[in-house]
Image: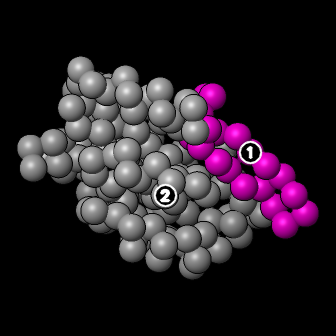
């Protein structure tokens, strides 16, 4: 079955899209939560890494059904060979910041330091994500239903 990795910066709609896909009956895993990530803190900040064993087990579990995985970690490119499709969700910076401010599902992005990190990631990380994605979807003016329909469509290709 198809394994789709949905990535993007904070505030682009990854979690909302996975919740929508889950409601449609798809198997979904948001690696931004739970036991899939290890955080390493050092003097320059915190890096987030997907755990290799957990990710391998997760991808292998998709043999009987389609699987949508989401997240954004420093080492995710190591796993791209295990995914059938890598989809980048992106949005205009002002939309991202507004969404982060309004959301109640996640506190990340509420502090000035975290907002600065989002701005820096938009400048430095987003271009790297764009280069490695199979599909780029701008969610700025899309509803979650429209995002889900587009993500569903990659299963048919």
Lateral position of residue 122 relative to residue 37, left or right = left
Front position in the image: 125 or 108: 125
Lateral position of residue 22 relative to residue 93, left or right = left
Residue 130 occupies quadrant: bottom left
Q: Helix, strand, or loop for circle 1? A: strand
Is the magenta region chiefly helix, strand or loop? strand
Residue 45 is situated, as x and y percent measured from the top left of the image, at 81, 61
Front position in the image: 85 or 101: 85
Please name the residue shown 44% across and 29% down the image: 58
Q: Give the range drawn in magenta.
A: 32-51
Q: Is 1 colored magenta in this rendering?
A: no
Q: Residue 39 carries which label?
A: 1
Looking at marks 1 and 2 on the same chain, the residue that comes earlier in the sequence is marked by: 1
Lateral position of residue 119 relative to residue 146, left or right = right
Q: Which mark is residue 77?
A: 2
Please name the residue shown 13% across and 47% down the image: 153
Residue 155 is situated, as x and y percent measured from the top left of the image, at 15, 42
Please name the residue shown 76% across and 64% down the image: 112
Q: Which mark is residue 133?
A: none
Lateral position of residue 107 relative to residue 82, left or right = right
Task: Count neighbours of disc 2 (C-alpha within 10 A) and say few if under 14, some if 14 to 19, many if 20 or more.
Answer: some
Q: Helix, strand, or loop for circle 2? A: helix
Please name the residue shown 40% across and 39% down the image: 69
């Amino acid at each position: 079955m198809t394994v789709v990795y949905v990535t993007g910066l904070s505030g682009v709609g990854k979690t909302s899209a996975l919740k929508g896909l889950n409601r449609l009956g798809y198997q979904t895993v948001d690696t931004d939560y739970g036991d899939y990530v290890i955080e390493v803190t050092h003097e320059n900040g915190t890096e987030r890494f997907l755990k290799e064993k957990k990710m391998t087990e997760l991808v292998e579990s998709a043999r009987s059904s389609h699987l949508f995985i989401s997240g954004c970690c420093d080492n995710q490119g190591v796993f791209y060979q295990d995914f059938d499709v890598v989809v980048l969700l992106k949005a205009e910076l002002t939309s991202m910041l507004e969404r982060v401010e309004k959301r109640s599902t996640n506190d990340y992005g509420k502090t000035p330091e975290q907002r600065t990190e989002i701005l820096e990631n938009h400048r430095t990380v987003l271009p790297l994500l764009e280069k490695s994605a199979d599909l780029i979807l701008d969610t700025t003016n899309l509803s979650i239903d429209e995002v889900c329909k587009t993500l569903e469509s990659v299963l048919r290709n």
